[in-house]
Image: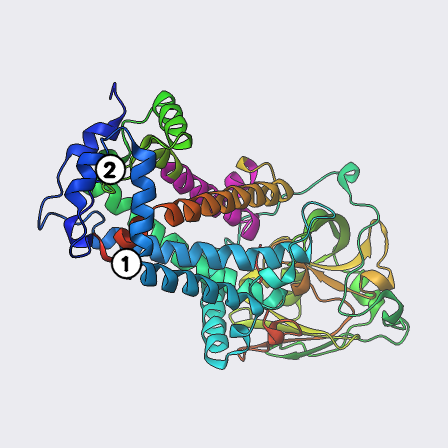
């Protein structure tokens, strides 16, 4: 990709009756993941407030889910099953179908930088939603890895005795909470940017809803 | 922009626009795209999506937590999580131990009441009562309990709230004690009644874990009232609220006994 994909993609006419931009399993996986991740985050905020990792920093209770610590824990440990099993199916299908390689690779820091600059200067095309630009590729891969870190650090907190290797990997119980919080903050950042992009290119929301 | 034709409102001269705006002028085409979206049915759909996002945000007002069927579902998942944790629990997996230098000083006081309301138990007429599926249903005095084989541990106490503290406990192996008094170790639960009206119950595999300690001492001293005099069951494999203090009665049973916090919605297994 020596030239930005902008021009190349624009010229491609939409084929009538062609495959959907997002196959059904991607859409289902996306929305279940969105639901699980949001519930995890909002209930996690309430759990965080019970004993803030960063002294002096709490999250306004009005933004949290669960009503009280016990309720928030119930939501958190219910949504985790959806997050984990949906995530496993999503990643497995992405790998098995070759979608992961097809849609996300190749990816180079240079391409990310180039498309990032193009996006800031309004030169990035969103004509072909079936094709991810390098910034999208990076952002989506990033949030997948971030979710994996969230699950692993969460496991290290939840079961710090039963998973000693994971506990050590996270730098001990207390440190696992810091890792968990930071990974959450990065995910929250992703959600904000992701929603802003959807607001800028509303067709991408339609594509994720009905596939086209 | 070459947008999919099915997205095109009737009569909209898309072809004209495509020729007027070559590929490189994407800023303009994005603007047109945005304007077109706003004048289309998809705008309403988008609005609906934003509304449902708002609806999701309203979940946070905890109103959904008051919904009966939602609570039933969450409680059912919590019971499922009990089973999942029992499955994950390895009876041979030891919690990490620490050195004297790593102790948290002062070790935090924590209870469902303030420190001024800590019960004062008179050790002289104290009797530990045993009941349920236990053959040796006699009572125990404190000197008799203190005479049992002694062991110490420095372990991390993890609170359900998230904080943790490292403490130094001394006492006797709870598993050995259960076997000594003839408890049915094939039963499901061990329950506790406490002098501060706290009550709690644990699974038998955790009761028999080598680090589960019936503690009479803290940091080399007799257990002070604030840490649960005359005895606390210390389990480094469970969260803090599962560790009962001021124990006055123990019973072995196959009937689920619940617990003070558990009955209010905290997870029963509470494993770490």
Residue beneath disc 2: A131
Residue A156 magenta-highlighted? yes
Q: Position of residue A165 (x, y in %)?
A: 51, 39
User: Residue placed farthest to the left in the image?
Assistant: A16
Q: In the image, what residue occupies the spot 87% across and 60% down?
A: B224
Classify 10 Å Cα crowding around label 2: few (below 14), some (14-19), many (20 and above). Answer: some
Q: Chain of mark 1?
A: B
- The span from disc 2 to disc 1 (Cα, nearest Å) is 24 Å
Q: Look at the numbered disc 2 and give the secondary structure of its residue.
A: loop
* Residue A124 vertical position relative to residue B204 in the rendered view, above or below: above
Q: Position of residue B23 (x, y in %)?
A: 23, 31
Classify 10 Å Cα crowding around label 1: few (below 14), some (14-19), many (20 and above). Answer: some
Return the residue nearer the eye: A123 or B231: A123
Q: In the image, what residue occupies the spot 88% across and 76% down?
A: B125
Q: Position of residue B15 (x, y in %)?
A: 15, 42
Q: Majority secondary structure of the magenta segment? A: helix
Q: Chain of mark 2?
A: A
Image quadrant for the C terminus of chain B? Answer: bottom right
Residue beneath disc 1: B40
Which of labels 2 and 1 is toward the front?
1
Residue A1 magenta-highlighted? no
Which residues, given as a range, are shown in magenta?
A140-168
Q: Look at the numbered disc 1 and give the secondary structure of its residue.
A: loop
* Residue B187 vertical position relative to residue A122 in the rendered view, above or below: below
In the picture, measured across the screen, residue A95 lies left or right of residue A56, that is: left
Q: Position of residue B26 (x, y in %)?
A: 30, 34
Image quadrant for the N terminus of chain B? Answer: top left
* Residue B262 vertical position relative to residue A89 in the rendered view, above or below: below
Q: Quadrant of residue A114?
A: top left
Return the residue nearer the eye: A144 or A80: A144
């Amino acid at each position: 990709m020596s030239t930005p994909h902008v021009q190349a993609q624009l010229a491609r006419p939409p084929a009538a009756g062609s495959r959907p931009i997002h196959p059904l399993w991607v859409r289902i996986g996306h929305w279940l993941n969105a639901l699980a991740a949001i519930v995890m985050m909002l209930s996690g905020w309430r759990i965080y407030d019970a004993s803030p990792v960063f002294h002096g920093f709490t999250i306004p209770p009005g933004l949290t889910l669960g009503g009280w610590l016990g309720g928030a824990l119930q939501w958190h440990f219910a949504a985790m099953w959806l997050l984990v099993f949906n995530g496993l199916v999503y990643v497995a299908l992405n790998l098995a179908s070759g979608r992961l390689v097809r849609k996300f690779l190749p990816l180079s820091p240079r391409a990310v930088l180039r498309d990032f600059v193009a996006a800031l200067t309004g030169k990035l095309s969103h004509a072909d939603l079936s094709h991810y630009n390098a910034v999208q590729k990076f952002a989506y891969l990033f949030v997948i890895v971030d979710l994996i870190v969230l699950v692993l650090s969460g496991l290290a907190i939840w079961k710090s005795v039963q998973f000693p290797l994971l506990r050590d990997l996270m730098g001990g119980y207390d440190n696992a909470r810091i890792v968990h919080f930071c990974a959450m903050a990065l995910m929250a950042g992703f959600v904000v940017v992701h929603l802003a992009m959807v607001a800028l290119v509303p067709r991408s929301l339609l594509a994720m809803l009905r596939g086209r | 922009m070459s947008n999919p034709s099915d997205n095109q409102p009737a009569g909209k001269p898309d072809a004209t626009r495509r020729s007027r705006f070559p590929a490189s002028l994407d800023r303009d085409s994005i603007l047109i795209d945005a304007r077109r979206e706003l004048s289309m049915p998809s705008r309403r759909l988008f609005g609906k999506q934003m509304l449902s996002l708002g609806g999701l945000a309203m979940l946070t007002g905890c109103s959904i937590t008051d919904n009966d069927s939602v609570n039933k579902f969450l409680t059912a998942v919590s019971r499922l999580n009990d089973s999942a944790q029992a499955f994950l629990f390895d009876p041979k997996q030891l919690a990490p131990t620490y050195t004297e230098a790593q102790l948290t000083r002062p070790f935090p006081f924590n209870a469902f009441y303030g420190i001024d309301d800590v019960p004062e138990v008179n050790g002289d007429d104290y009797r530990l009562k045993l009941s349920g599926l236990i053959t040796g249903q006699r009572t125990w005095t404190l000197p008799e309990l203190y005479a049992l084989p002694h062991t110490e541990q420095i372990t991390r106490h993890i609170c359900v709230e998230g904080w943790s503290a490292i403490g130094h406990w001394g006492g006797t192996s709870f598993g050995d004690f259960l076997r000594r008094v003839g408890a049915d170790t094939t039963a499901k639960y061990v329950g506790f009644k406490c002098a501060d009206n706290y009550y709690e119950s644990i699974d038998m595999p955790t009761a028999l874990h080598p680090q589960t300690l019936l503690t009479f001492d803290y940091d080399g001293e007799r257990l002070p009232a604030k840490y649960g005099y005359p005895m606390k069951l210390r389990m480094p494999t469970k969260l803090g609220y599962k560790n009962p203090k001021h124990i006055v009665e123990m019973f072995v049973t196959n009937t689920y006994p619940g617990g003070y916090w558990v009955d209010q919605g905290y997870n029963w297994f509470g494993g770490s």
